[in-house]
Image (cartoon, rainbow, N blue to C red):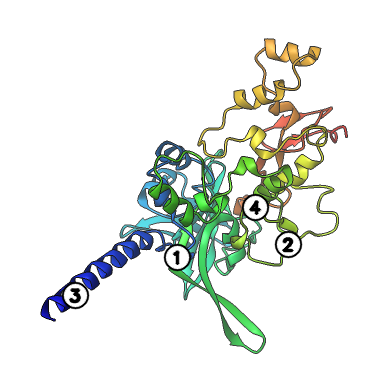
Amino acid sequence: MYSRNITITILIFFLGALIFLQCMQSGSLTNDMRGKEFAGYSQCIDCHKDIFHDYTHNNHYKTSTFTSSQTISPIITRENNTVTFINDQSVVVEHKDSLFYQTWYKAGKMIESKTMDIAFGSGRHAQTFGFLNNRQWYELPLTYLTNLGIWTNSPGFPINEPYFTRIIPSRCFECHASYVSVIKEKTGPLQLEEKFNKNAMILGIDCERCHGPAAQHVQFHRQHPDEKLAHNIVPIKSLNRKQQLDLCATCHSGNPVSMRSIFTFTPGDTLSNFYLYYPGAKNSPDVHGMQLQALELSKCFQQSTLTCLTCHQSHSGKSNSTNFTATCFSCHNTTPHAIAMNKENKGCISCHMPLSSSKSLDFNNGTSGKNIPYLLHNHRIAIYPAILQDKNTGASGKEPKP
């Protein structure tokens, strides 16, 4: 009887140990704050180390970050840390007590000062900053324009005085982050406020934002390390053209009416189940955020199977105009114009996707009231009859040929 009890005890112990080990193995894949179906990007590194290393230099990965001295110090100089406003007002970017602030002064007296807690934008073109107050995110009054190396009034902000009360809603994070935890609290009759948990945010666009939940994928390949065919995940190349475009268009098709959180979008989903576009949105797309609508107006798009991935290397942190030109020449390699441009080593996009001023993002630098153009390449591939590229005013000229 005694030996039988000992045997049962040993069996229970080993069974418990086995269950514990299984829980530990699966638990390592279920610590992601989005839920147990997500693995977390750190789990991707074991098998995709080189790809992940490249991706950390990609603009999507860096599209939002918590600020640090490494990211802010390089863009602050004594000669260029102030934007002035009328009535002896200014906003100064300051470094105090290991933190960075945007501080409003009036007649030399400090009116308001807020920490620069978060940065939106990779910094390739610009970065706008925000601060957290009472679990709500607010946009700060100054934006840094990388190409010009200047601080300027944040887009759409008033020109007469600094502005610290613009709320950053969760919708902004849907295209600048991979996850945010937000709850809606009732603050009055028919009034709700979004409240964020700073410790429950995944900034930047991580692997699973585009590839979908990967816990089962990681678990399978850890158990079958010699299997080279991807299991339990949707390869992007396996998606049809519409599905690939819908995936990119979650963040590159404007700011439509959102019917469902885009955080729940996975590869293969239909975008029209999430977004409702305004009538006429496709007619005159802005160069900022509406790349898909502009691309759809192009004959190159209409007469081919072209997708975003035809030109863009989604994991690479490098943008090479030579690669873009090579893609163009995969079709346009026999015309006299193409042959002549190739001999002169001239790229295609500077003329056929010219830098153009955004109509939705307008910057001004306070006192002078001068509008500063925000220049991006136009994704409407076309013949532009008169391109007058002026770095001060942006590309101008006649409308492209249809």
* C-alpha distance separating marks 2 and 1: 25 Å
**Three-letter amino acid code at the position of disc 3:** Thr
Up/down of 352 relative to 96, above or below: above
Q: Residue furthest right?
A: 402
Q: Position of residue 122 (x, y in %)?
A: 52, 46
In the rendered view, would you say 6 is above or below 248? below
Q: Mark 3 vs mark 4: which is more N-terminal? A: 3
Residue at the extreme front: 1
Q: Marks 2 and 1: CB-CB under 8 Å?
A: no
Packing grade of label 1 (10 A; few <14, some 14-19, many >=20) is some
- Nearest to N terminus: mark 2 or mark 1: 1
Q: Is residue 79 left or right of residue 367?
A: left
Mark 1 belongs to which amino acid? Answer: Met
Q: Residue at the spot x=74%, y=47% of the render?
A: 286
Under mark 4, the amino acid is Cys
Alpha carbon separation for disc pair 3 and 4? 57 Å
* Label 2 with label 4: CB-CB less than 8 Å: no
Q: Which residue is mark 4?
A: 251
Task: Please identify the quadrant where the N terminus is shown.
Answer: bottom left
| Mark 3 lies on residue | 9
Between 229 and 4, the residue placed more toward the observer is 4
On the image, numbered disc 2 is attached to which residue? Answer: 273
Q: Nearer the viewer, residue 292 or 346?
A: 292
Gap between marks 4 and 1 measured at Cα: 22 Å
Decide: few, some or many residues near mark 4? Use Cα within 10 Å; few <14, some 14-19, many ≥20. Answer: some
Q: Mark 1 — residue?
A: 33
Q: Residue furthest left?
A: 2
Point out the tag, 2 or 4, that comes first from the N-terminus: 4
12 vs 204, nearest the viewer: 12
